[in-house]
Amino acid sequence: MVAILFIEDDRPIRESLERALTQRGHVVTTAVDGLEGLRRAVEDSPDLVVLDLGLPDIDGNDLVRMLRAISDVPVIVATARDAEEDVVRSLDAGADDYLVKPFSADTLDARMRAVLRRARGGAADVPLVVGGLHIDRRAHEVTLDDVEVTLTRKEFELLEYLARNVGAVVSKRELLAEVWAQPFGGGERTVDVHLSWLRGKLGESANEPRYLHTVRGVGVRLIAPN
Ligand code: CA
């Protein structure tokens, strides 16, 4: 799930993409011009901004610079102009990627994932530490109290996602969307099974949790034991 701010004055485009992205499990807010877009970017702190370069009040590239001045949020510009200099100007202004209209929701979704991967890539160099858990994302290694824990790829991704959201209750639906790329749900059993394996490898159980705490009916939370 990604919180997207979509700044677009063309109503049919705005509404159809909003619908398509919402159906993919994303949370979408929209703005019809640059000023409203700036305000929403501050108030909603989205994970990603998609903006149309041809806005009624502010030139899209100027808007990218304004956004850059206040936040590191990844920005994808959508443009009807496919002239190379426009694209270069947007990237120079600080945009992370661009799409030439018309584009499909599938294309946008794929570009969003790529941009977010790159945006999060920088932070991936830093190990995640929760209590005695040490998660080295570059080496894909986990140690618990200095003892190496061997995890499968999915178990590692599950643990890493929970550690990135340490202290927060994460729903199974969100885990399905983020770790298994299944935003439509229906695989909660898969999450349960992997959580159970992960618990086993961390030497704990659902009844006697140390790091992985089930919040009944809501989800699971990773916290450092007292
Ligand atoms: Ca426009």
Image (cartoon, rainbow, N blue to C red):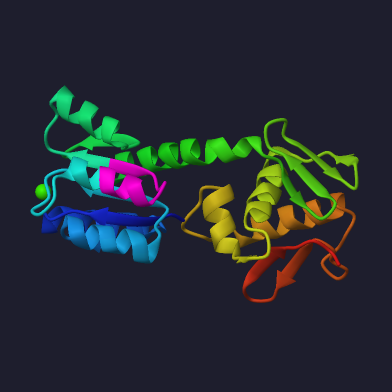
Residue 94 visible to an observer of this rendering: yes
The quadrant in which the C terminus is found is bottom right
Residue 31 visible in this rendered orientation of the protein? no
Is residue 6 shown left or right of residue 8? right
Relative height, residue 203 to residue 79 (above, below): below
Q: Using the image, determine if residue 184 lies above or below residue 102.
A: below
Please state the extent of the stretch shown in magenta in the rendering: 65-76
Which residue is more in the foreground, 99 or 103? 99
Q: Position of residue 72 (x, y in %)?
A: 42, 46
> Where does residue 64 sit, x and y in percent of width and height?
26, 44
Above or below 211: residue 128: above
Residue that appears at 70% across and 60% down? 192
Q: Is residue 67 magenta?
A: yes
| Residue in the foreground of this view, choosing between 68 and 22 | 68
Residue 79, picture quadrant: top left
Tell me if 35 is positioned left or right of 50 in this view.
left
Which residue corresponds to the image point at 28% horizontal and 63% vertical from the top-left? 39
Which residue lies most toward the front here? 69
Q: Picture coordinates of residue 95 (x, y %)?
A: 31, 37
**Residue found 20% across the figure and 40% down from its top:** 61
Please give the name of the residue rendered at 41% of the width and 38% of the height, measured from the top-left corner: 115
The answer to which of 219 and 29 lies nearer the viewer is 29
From this viewpoint, which residue is outermost toward the bottom? 217
Q: Position of residue 116 (x, y in %)?
A: 45, 42
